[in-house]
Amino acid sequence: MIPVSLVVVVVGGWTAVYLTDLVLKSSVYFKHSYEDWLENNGLSISPFHIRWQTAVFNRAFYSWGRRKARMLYQWFNFGMVFGVIAMFSSFFLLGKTLMQTLAQMMADSPSSYTSSSSSSSSSSSSSASSFSSSSSSSSSSSSSLHNEQVLQVVVPGINLPVNQLTYFFAAVLISGVVHEIGHGIAAIREQVRFNGFGIFLFVIYPGAFVDLFTTHLQLISPVQQLRIFCAGIWHNFVLALLGILALVLLPVILLPFYYTGVGVLITEVAEDSPAIGPRGLFVGDLVTHLQDCPVTNVQDWNECLDTIAYEPQIGYCISASTLQQLSFPVRAYKRLDGSTECCNNHSLTDVCFSYRNNFNKRLHTCLPARKAVEATQVCRTNKDCKKSSSSSFCIIPSLETHTRLIKVKHPPQIDMLYVGHPLHLHYTVSITSFIPRFNFLSIDLPVVVETFVKYLISLSGALAIVNAVPCFALDGQWILNSFLDATLTSVIGDNDIKDLIGFFILLGGSVLLAANVTLGLWMVTAR
């Protein structure tokens, strides 16, 4: 469900804005001065929509559009080729996404959608849409251990965490501005009059638009139109590529201030995290191992937890003398899931272990967890322990099906012994691969930069993909029309037939996109 507080704030805020606008426009004293003020500042207000347009940037746009004309010509030619390929590829991508969604619905096991997020263009303007290309956050709490769809429906407040909204809306706005800058420069390059640039807010989504002289657009050739209509998604694609490059080079860029490759730094531990406690994890701790799995970066952390979660519980070697010294008579019983318990349910220090004696008989014993697993090698069977000592046993924690005992090394502190589901540790502890070289540096700065860049990649990529769909009111509609004019005019003399072909392609793209959005929203909100 969408948080009630979010709905109240959004609806209440827009109601206040609209009523204020209505009162001022109805006032005898303020009507003319208020309307003049709106017109002079390029503002227009309607229900759930505020729009601002200006000619302040026209000189800059004309300067960019007329500089290095030959290079721009080649640049937008590449964009035109990309746009046409993206338009047809979007059918395959949306079809694949729809099949994945239907498969999830049939299996009645919808996968969780991350915080990642979306945007698209509306008509000649850009706005946020319901789609986001998959992208994980720099903190482990924002990542997923499972495979995800390339495109996902995102609803702020439901599958987009509230603390990620700043990244989301900033990336949406920047992606939209870059998209429209592409249209504007391409239009000026093709001698189309540029009237102005603007920004809008629709409900909670920011976006941008350019105002072009429609008559000029209609007079130029279909190929010139293609360069203009494809320029937006081309710029979004390039922005996503630059974001990927920045992400790859981020360790090098931050090298004078942060180093990597020695572990992961704890940046946040949720209040309800099982890792909280006197011997738990704290902000600033450096984790180097999970069990015997070395951790040098965030990817290692995720892969180690993934391995621990889906492989059987690992055991620990213990000498026969130590086992005899620590163990005490117990009464074992079966849990509901079939596992065996042999300790007091309320014990916070003891864990039930199973092992096989020299006669290969399975036994259970209750041991102090820390004394049993400290300074011991890991094992799967008794044979793994014979290498170090002939009189050793491999004791394996006897826990519930999905519960694991995990030894977390974070020197110089004593190892943390975590008992619980690995996913709980995964989602309640935020980490980063970047360790500050100096004490005055913030441990959060690399996380902020990395998370924002990932959102920018995701949203700019989504804007390029979704806006290329041949769908009514998206750039894909105009790309398709211009493409058909450029390719079929000489083949099909009858414009009505050509328009009919275009209509059915647009109808198919619109239905496919609407089906993805509708089913995606249902998957997100109906849980």
Image: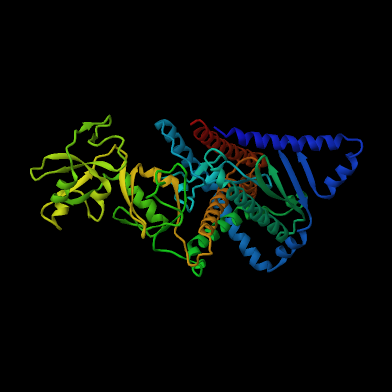
Q: Which residue lies furthest to the right in this view?
A: 29
Q: In this view, does 290 lie to the left or right of 198?
A: left
Q: Which residue lies furthest to the left in this view?
A: 359
Q: Which residue is drawn at 85% across and 37% down?
A: 25
Residue 192: which quarter of the image? bottom right
Q: Height in image: 343 above or below 388?
A: above
Q: Which of 434 and 41 is in front in this view?
A: 434
- Where does residue 254 sit, x and y in percent of width and height? 51, 66
- Where does residue 200 sit, x and y in percent of width and height? 71, 46
Q: Is residue 89 visible?
A: yes
Q: Residue at x 66, y 37 (%)?
A: 10
- Where does residue 203 sit, x and y in percent of width and height? 67, 39
Q: Quadrant of the N terminus?
A: top right
Q: Nearer the viewer, residue 303 or 266?
A: 266
- Where does residue 112 sit, x and y in percent of width and height? 45, 39
Q: Can residue 145 be seen in this view?
A: no
Q: Height in image: 122 above or below 47?
A: below
> How is the structure coloured here?
rainbow
Q: Is residue 165 left or right of residue 402?
A: right
Q: Is residue 26 left or right of residue 131?
A: right
Residue 182: which quarter of the image? bottom right
Q: Which of 504 and 131 is in front in this view?
A: 131
